[in-house]
Structures are given as structure tokens and as C-alpha cells.
Image (spheres, helix red, strand yellow):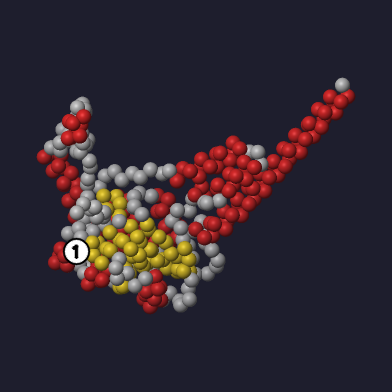
Amino acid sequence: MSLDADSIVDRRRMRRKVTFWRVTAALCAIAVIGALALMVASRTGLTERGSGAYIARIKIQGLIRGNQDRVDALERLAKSSARAVIVHIDTPGGTTAGSEQLFDALRRLGAQKPTVAVIDGLAASGGYIAAMAADHIVALDTSLVGSIGVLFQYPNFTDALKTLGIKVEEIKSTPLKAAPSSFEPTSPEARAAIAAIVMDSYSWFRGLVKDRRKLDDAQLARVADGRVFTGRQGLELKLVDALGNEQAAVAWLQREKNVPQNTPVRDYSLQPRFRDLPFLHVAALTFEAAGLSDFARRIEEWGAVRAIERLNLDGLLALWHPSSAN
């Protein structure tokens, strides 16, 4: 009986020790994560790095759509100690609403700080809308700019459904409800309604180009037919202001906006989400090793939310994509 009692006591002591070291490991992991968060944040715009004035470098890449996080980040940047902003752009555009939201946010930023857009590869359609928000546009000789226009497209499976013998039944309150539909031929009335929306948005886009680029009607007609132009062509057509790269943008800021020479250029992230930081996977492994597997799994799931974000481009598009058909 005494042996059993001693064994029970030893087990309890062992459990307490294991629990103690697990908690200690978890606390150490939290401290490490916090330190890494501060380090990464200082490089991604979560906090400002260093002291004194600097030129903020932000990037607009990929498909553009509504993004309140990006708007919030631009508002924080407007209140920061950044002396000016360089906006690197490489995007085919996206939704018209998302492009308008981004344009408005960049214009509010430009009201507080001088801004220069640098077109790295492509600023087409909604991407060019974003570029026009800047005070000055710089493009590489071979960059592509323009694609001034609006697109509404949808698949039509009518013939495929007939071949498969499938008929989609529906009851609508009015003929134009949920029109056009991918499951029936587009009626003239539905086509006219969508065309009216497209042309209204196109008129808004044209007006933006005319106002921001100071074009007359003849100049606007030359660039607003949906084509893309090289940076060299865009300079002649007044779609861009100068040819060059980031160095040309910095030189313009120094010359025209009195930004002091040797002002450092620093990256400023427009997606400063803690759950996106790359060390989350390492943190999960740390908690797993500490025996806190459930907590580790929650961290992994948390970080995966953004990784599996769905692409949603419903509605009007200000988007350029060359046809693959020859």
C-alpha cells in the first residue's frame, strides 16, 4: 500500500512538472511571437520604422477589388511621418467599384502628402485609374498603360444545357430580374439594360481621364478606345508624365516637392494583418511541441483564412486581359 501511495505522489509530482514546463514553453513562445511581431510590423507598416521623415513605398499589385483594410492602411499612412509616397503599380485592374474606392483613398492620401505613381509593368484599366490618383506618373519605356474602358461579361451555357438535356426553371417578378442569365439566351431588353450600365461607367472613366490628365476631346478620343499603350506611347499621349523608374520618382519629389536629398525610401505595407505574418506556422509548431496541440491547430486555421481567400469579381470590371485566341 505504501508503494502505491508513493507511486501516486510521484505521478502527481511528474504531472505538475510537465504542466509547469508546458506553461513555461507557451509563455516563452508568446514572448517570441510578440518580439517577431514587432520586428515584422516595423517592416510592413504596422508601425513606423526608425525616426524622422522618409518616403513611403507602397505597392498595388494583382486584381483590384474593394478592400477596406487597404483604405484604412492608406489613412494611417496619411497621418504618418512619411514625407511623400511612391505608389508602385503592376495590375491589370479589377472591379470598377474597387478601383474607384482605391482611387478615392489615394486622392485623400495625396491631399496630405505628395504622391508619385511608378508603373512597373502594367497599369491597365482599373490599374490606370489608381495611377491617375497620383500627382505625377512615371512609367518604364515598355510598361503598358491605358485600356480605358469597362467590361461586363458572363458565361452562357444555353447550348451546353440543350446538349445535356437540362432545362433550368425559374419564376421572376419582372423580365429583367437577375438578367442576364447564364441559363437562357440574353433578351434584347436585358442586353440594352446592361449596355446602359457599361456606358454610364465608361462615361465616368472617360471623365476621370479627361480631368486628371488635362486632355481635350480630341486627345481623349485617341486614348479611350480600350487599347493599351507602351510607356513611350503613353508619354506622347499624355497618359504618363515621364519615363523612368523609382529613381526618377524620387528625383521629381526632390525637384518639385522639396523633399530633401538622401531621404530614405521605406516599404509600407497596405495589408498589415497580424494573422498574415509568416511566423504563425512556426508559432503553431512551438505550441504543438509544448503539448498544446489544440491551440496550435487554432493558430494554423487562423493563418489559413487569408491563404484560401476566394476570388470574387462579380459586376462591372475595369480589367484588361489579352485574348489567348489567335
Identify the residue at image location x=16%, y=46%. Answer: 195
Specify the amino acid type for callout 1. Answer: Val
Residue 55 visible in rendering: yes
Quadrant of the image containing the C terminus: bottom left
The residue drawn where x is 25% and y is 47% is 316
Which residue is at the front of the view, 255 or 26?
Answer: 26
**With 81 as the anchor, is 29 left or right in this view?**
right
Residue ranking furthest to the top: 1
Depth order, front residue of 278/50: 278
Residue 112 percent location from the top left of the image: 40, 64
Which of the two residues, 106 or 266, is positioned nearer the viewer here?
Answer: 266
> Which residue appears farthest toward the front when viewing the image?
326
Residue at image position (26%, 50%) is: 317
x and y percentages locating residue 51 in the rendered image: 55, 67
Quick one: SS at disc 1?
A: helix
Residue occupying image coordinates x 64% and y 50%: 31
Where in the figure is residue 168, as x and y percent of width and height?
21, 28
- From this view, report whether residue 153 is shown above or below residue 102: above
Q: Residues within 10 Å of mark 1 (few under 14, many from 20)?
A: many
In the depicted structure, whether residue 230 falls above or below residue 4: below
Q: Which residue is mark 1?
A: 223
Tell me the quadrant of the picture where the N terminus can be found.
top right
Q: Quadrant of residue 220?
A: bottom left
User: Would you say 312 lies left or right of 5 here?
Assistant: left
Q: How many marks?
A: 1
The image quadrant that residue 130 belongs to is: bottom left
